Amino acid sequence: MSQRTALYDQHLEANGKIVDFAGWEMPIHYGSQIEEHHRVRRDAGMFDVSHMVIVDLEGRRTREFLQRLLANDVGRLKAPGKALYSCMLNEQGGIIDDLITYHVTDDYFRIVVNAATRDKDLAWIGRQAAAFDVTVTERPEIAMIAVQGPNARDRAMSVLTEGEARQAGELAPFFGRFIGPYFIARTGYTGEDGFEIMVTDHQAPTLWSRLREAGVGPCGLGARDTLRLEAGMNLYGTDMDETTSPLESGLGWTVAWEPAERDFIGRAALEAQRATGGLKRFVGLVLEGRGVLRGHQRVFTDSGAEGETTSGTFSPTLQRAIAMARVPADIGERCEVEIRGRRLPARVVKMPFVRNGQSLID
Amino acid sequence: MSNIPAELKYTKSHEWVSDNENGTVTVGITDHAQALLGDLVFVELPETGKTLEAEEPCAVVESVKAASDIYAPLAGEIVAVNEKLEDEPELINSDPYGEGWIFKMKLADPDALASLLGADDYAAEADQ
């Protein structure tokens, strides 16, 4: 059964081309994916991300629960409002999902998980939460609008009341809090500054319209994908899944090994992987010549060892093909990628490719 | 509604074919096809001089979303390619029937042109 967000009519009105995404009828673009991409890099664009799953976790032992559930450590969230990116692992160290946790109060955390993994995430979280007396409440009645770009915050604040705008303006990067009728977070999935604004389904169309009037252009999931790839941000189900380890997905930095006694789910498996060694690396690739990199292309190192791209695209900012790839550890500064039977040279780079509108690869 | 010029011939795989009335044809992809593909970012052109069977894949257009094969509408030999597309693949989006042409071919059998779809038949095809 296909679902629609509270902003479906707004997408049609803006000429959105609607596609199925994880069971949701979502706009892939509103005319030109590349223009929408540039708009976010240069000015301000907004995405309907209401299909994402907001879950509130409440109870005295919520922090303790999340320290068991997540590979990253919410113990790092000292200041109220701070956000944390983490993987949620299974016992084998595979990634069930990646998510963001917002620390609201010591007994109230809000997490946002992927739409495509909703059912298994809720089942897993519910099962683990029982032992901690944590209440798990999905919030399907809340929509979410991501306003992103160098001018995104100013534009968004211009549609808020004076008091709300002041509070939103005080949010440091990677912080979020309840402000007026919203939960506003200075987070995103584009490599640009901006807000993710959670708002009730009922109020979402009005906020969307006001943002449009303030000069924030609607952007589809297509631009969201090229933006996140340039920003070196993984996409669940594409760059990693339950069969891959965060240590082979460029997400080692999100695994909090200290304190050593914190027994998060998957820890033993990751420690064994670390001890065994031979892990693959997760790198960025830039195609030297013409062409477009895509997911699942074969990658060859100088020694002839083989890896694979996990996602790839033509980067509108860099005007060249880029990809993420899981490759043998012996990879050097260069490799070859097989495209339609031909091996083409590519450069191996550290991600992100682009941050705050600037290329980081040359 | 996409633009389907009445004077052109078409294939089910969304190529348009223009009769140059000297035994050669010019080939591109339709307005409908470019709209489906979205912003084009790369075109792999065929080699001039290459001989092709009808419906043989001979070029690739890639949008940010996906790669798509272009097929020879009829048997023949490639006699020219639009090299401008190497730097400006977006010409296919902006002017699919003009500056966005992809290649020209000399037909093995010029009479075979009659076997291609007319604009009305293609419109019905594109509608599905």
Image (tube, coloured by chain):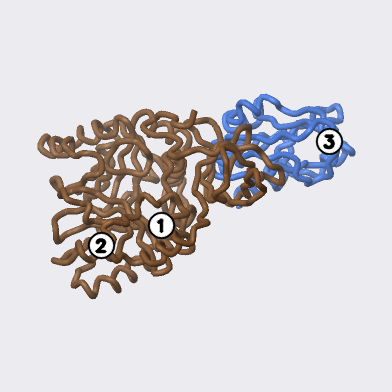
Chain colours: A brown, B blue
Q: Earlier in the sequence, mark 2 or mark 1?
A: 1
- The amino acid marked with disc number 3 is Lys
Residue sitting at 69 percent across and 45 percent down?
A: A340
Q: Distance from label 2 to label 1 (Cα)?
A: 32 Å
Q: Residues within 10 Å of mark 1 (few under 14, many from 20)?
A: some
Taking depth in this image into account, of A304 and A230 the one nearest to the observer is: A304
Q: Do pointers 2 and 1 mark residues of a single chain? A: yes
Who is closer to the viewer here, A272 or A253? A272
On the same chain, marks 2 and 3? The answer is no
User: Label 3: chain?
Assistant: B
Using the rendered view, name the quadrant where residue A293 is placed: top right
Q: Which residue is mark 3?
A: B50
- Is A265 displayed left or right of B28 in the figure? left
Label 2: which residue? A67
Q: Secondary structure at mark 2?
A: helix
Q: Residue at x 14, y 45 (%)?
A: A179
Q: Position of residue A183 (x, y in %)?
A: 20, 48
Provide the residue designation for mark 1.
A24
Quadrant in the picture for residue A153: top left
Q: Residues within 10 Å of mark 2 (few under 14, many from 20)?
A: some
Give the mark toward the camera: 2 or 1: 2
Q: Amino acid at mark 1?
A: Trp
Q: Determine the image quadrant of residue A274.
A: bottom left
Judging from the image, mark 1 belongs to the subunit labelled: A
Quadrant (top left, top right, bottom left, bottom right) of the N terminus of chain A: bottom left
Task: Report whether A111 appears left or right of B5.
Answer: left
